[in-house]
Image: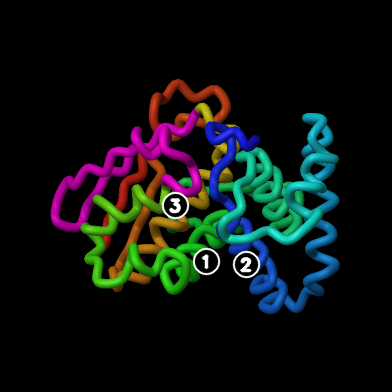
Amino acid sequence: MRDKEKEHQLGDFIKGRTLFIQEICKKKGLNFEDTQEAIRREAVRLAKRNERGEQLEKRLFGGAILASSYLPDWVDKFFLKAMTVVLQGPGSQLYTTSSKRPCIAFEAGRFNAHRQAEGVFHVFFVGKKPEEWLTGAFATIYRQCYGAKAAERLVSEQLSEKHFKIMLDNKDLEKAGPIDCSTVIGYLYGGLEKLGAKGIEVNHTKCAVLAGSIETHCIYDVTWK
């Protein structure tokens, strides 16, 4: 039986990552099948360090993943890191702390926000103002990917008309890490773009999941004009 505490409805997010890879391949003139195979090999290599290579093959690359599919957090963790390494190149900065310095993980989050706003999460975007989305709908979407416990700890604080502080606590999730934080920056940025906000800036001012961090929460400073 599926462990609801450790698996979340990541199917559509994973699907979005694959579509993002296709999009990057088109822009860069890369062969999608070869790129996807390189990502598979890198993901399995990373997972084997944790004795999860075989499981990863079965759960992620072994069959069709539906939007409704539940997957362990660590599956997305290895896929996201492998995707970043292959598309961005070894030795590159794998994450960012600001929308002013985009990276692959940021763009993947932004891409998913755009496509989900027009698809599976359309109801959470249509007719919403940016401030309404940040104080309500974003938490519902976050719950799908990170689970009920993490969503309950989400705090969205409005500091002024177009200035929010988002506080997250997902330290107990296996997918937590600075690369995943970059996808959150991208998702916030992309979500606000779809809602018509201009001059958006998202800065990850405190990170609780960076190695050696003493912070209790990840904090995102979000502004627009």
Amino acid type, residue under disc 1 in the picture: Phe
CB within 8 Å, label 1 to label 2: yes
The image quarter in which residue 207 lies: top left
Q: Residue 20 carries which label?
A: 2
Of residues 12 and 163, which is closer to you in this image?
Answer: 12
Q: In which quarter of the image is the C terminus?
A: bottom left
Q: In this view, does 52 lie to the left or right of 220?
A: right
The mark that comes first in sequence, 1 or 3, is 1
Dot 1 lies on which element? Answer: helix
The image quarter in which residue 6 lies: top right
Q: Is residue 142 left or right of residue 223?
A: right
Amino acid type, residue under disc 3 in the picture: Ile
For label 3, count other residues whose C-alpha is less than 10 Å away and answer few (under 14), some (14-19) or many (20+): many
Q: Quadrant of the N terminus?
A: top right
Amino acid type, residue under disc 2 in the picture: Phe
| Residue 107 rendering spot, x and y as whole percentages | 54, 62
Identify the residue under disc 1: 111
- The residue mark sitting in front, 2 or 3, is 2
At 31% from the left and 43% from the top, the residue drawn is: 166
For label 2, count other residues whose C-alpha is less than 10 Å away and answer few (under 14), some (14-19) or many (20+): many
Q: Give the colour scheme shown.
A: rainbow
Residue range of the region highlighted in magenta in the rendering: 143-171
Q: Which mark is residue 185?
A: 3
Dot 2 lies on which element? Answer: helix
User: What's the CA distance linking mark 1 and mark 2?
Assistant: 7 Å
